[in-house]
Amino acid sequence: MAERVDCGVKYWISTASCRRSLIVLAAFLAVGFSVSSASAAEDGKTLEVQAFRGGYGLDFFQKAAKEYEGKHPGVKITVDGNPRVWEQLIPRFADGTPPDLTWPGWGMNIWPLVFEGQLLPFDKWLDGPADGSKKTWRQTFSPNLLVRGQYKGKTYILPYNIDAYGIWYNKALFDQHGWKAPATYEELLPLCEKIKAAHIAPLTFTGRYPMYLLNGIYYPWVISIGGLDGYKNAQNLVPGAWKAPAFLEAAKRIMEMKKLGNFEAGCVGMNHTESQMELLVGRAAMIPCGTWLHAEMENLIPKGFEMTYMKTPVFANGKGDPTLIYASADGKGWVIPTKGHNHELAADFYRYLSSPAKAKEFIETKGTLMSVIPETELHPPPHLVEPLKCMKEAKSTWATEQQDWYPAFETLIENSLKDMYNEMITPEQFVDILENGAAAVRNDPSITKMKVQ
């Protein structure tokens, strides 16, 4: 995963005056874009794809484009992108020259594009046949992931590979010391004491980007303590939900872990690669992170290191379903711009790209989870075996959807979590701030409200 920056409204400005400025900027940024010419676009056989180039690269999509061209003589598909592709996409949407198909990446707030009619719904294609399957295209997607890209009953954002948060550890190190991966918070505490006795920090985390601690530990504990409906209420801005007992109790447990010395000293100032290296070099035993971790650190993993996943330990007496797992579309998802050319070709290429056969290939070659369920036997890499098992066993999945819907509120949550960790505010003050922030969003008529299904 690329280094996190503040995202959301600062990367998509909806005011007309700011858009006019972006249009001017677009003229300067247009150099280097492979935008299809009008004549080429009109022939219906040229497709421009701009995609986020993260830990999995673009080679898979570029290879798929060549395969598709081979199956459809006369079609020409260009696939390009970079780690901050949204910075090129924003002015192109503003001046009406977006690509035909795009994966904007996590740094762009897609929902304003939906609200303003700048994206096409996929539904007329989703209800048609899938590529290489007897199912409809819609039926090949995990339903609880597909619904997250819907607005007013229409599907505007399609997922591809997905991220599952959890805790990662070195199984070889655990085996060496006879440590067992904890399933509950009650098992986690005595394990931390054993790890500290070996002069290793039990847990580290990416303090500079608090979403890792939120998604990997805090929200799973909120859900374990109070149940998934309580977290859904918070996302849906129900009055009082953000300061419900489960939110306060989970915050107190974060601070309990800190006071016990179970978090690595100084990790609150680390970025993602710095904290992840602490795990790889053995100074920390565990880290909360998504399933992109192996791909992101692959070239730095020491010989003999067995990167292994476990779900975040839950509370033994919690109300939440212990099988639940965080799962969300990596980089938000793929979209078809209304002002792009060749909508039919864009949809058909993505239909090919997201076929069960290509999903299987992406899992096996890139080592990540997919929103499309393969229809033949999988041969996943070792680090993906446990996440796949957990996904199969999960009765449902959840995601931090308010992070995408209300970016300014998300910034408040992240900053407040860091303030609490640094003991600038108490857990009680932390949940009060969250509740007040939710009320501000709820009472602001200029903000489009969304709802967890």
Image (cartoon, rainbow, N blue to C red):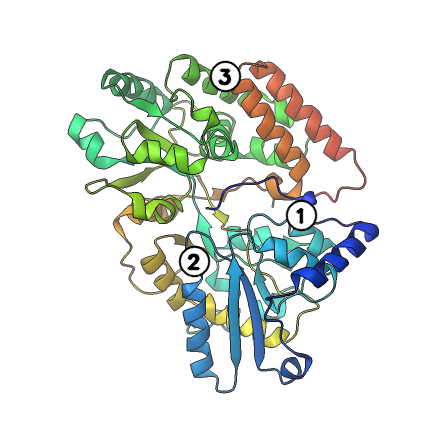
Q: Is residue 240 visible?
A: no
Residue at left 36%, top 62%? 360
Which of the numbered marks, if any, corresponds to residue 289? none
Q: Amino acid at mark 3?
A: Lys
Q: Residues within 10 Å of mark 3 (few under 14, many from 20)?
A: some
In the image, is residue 33 above or below residue 259? Answer: below
Q: Tag 2's secondary structure?
A: loop
Q: Is residue 383 left or right of residue 40?
A: left
Real-space Cα distance between discs 1 and 2? 23 Å
**Callouts 1 and 3 close, C-beta under 8 Å:** no
Q: Position of residue 433 (x, y in %)?
A: 66, 22
Q: Which residue is mark 2?
A: 57
Name which of mark 2 and mark 3 comes first in the sequence: 2
Which of the numbered marks, if any, corresponds to residue 11? 1
Q: Which residue is mark 3?
A: 252
Q: Quadrant of residue 158?
A: bottom right
Q: Nearer the viewer, mark 2 or mark 3?
A: 2
In the image, is residue 98 above or below residue 225? Answer: below
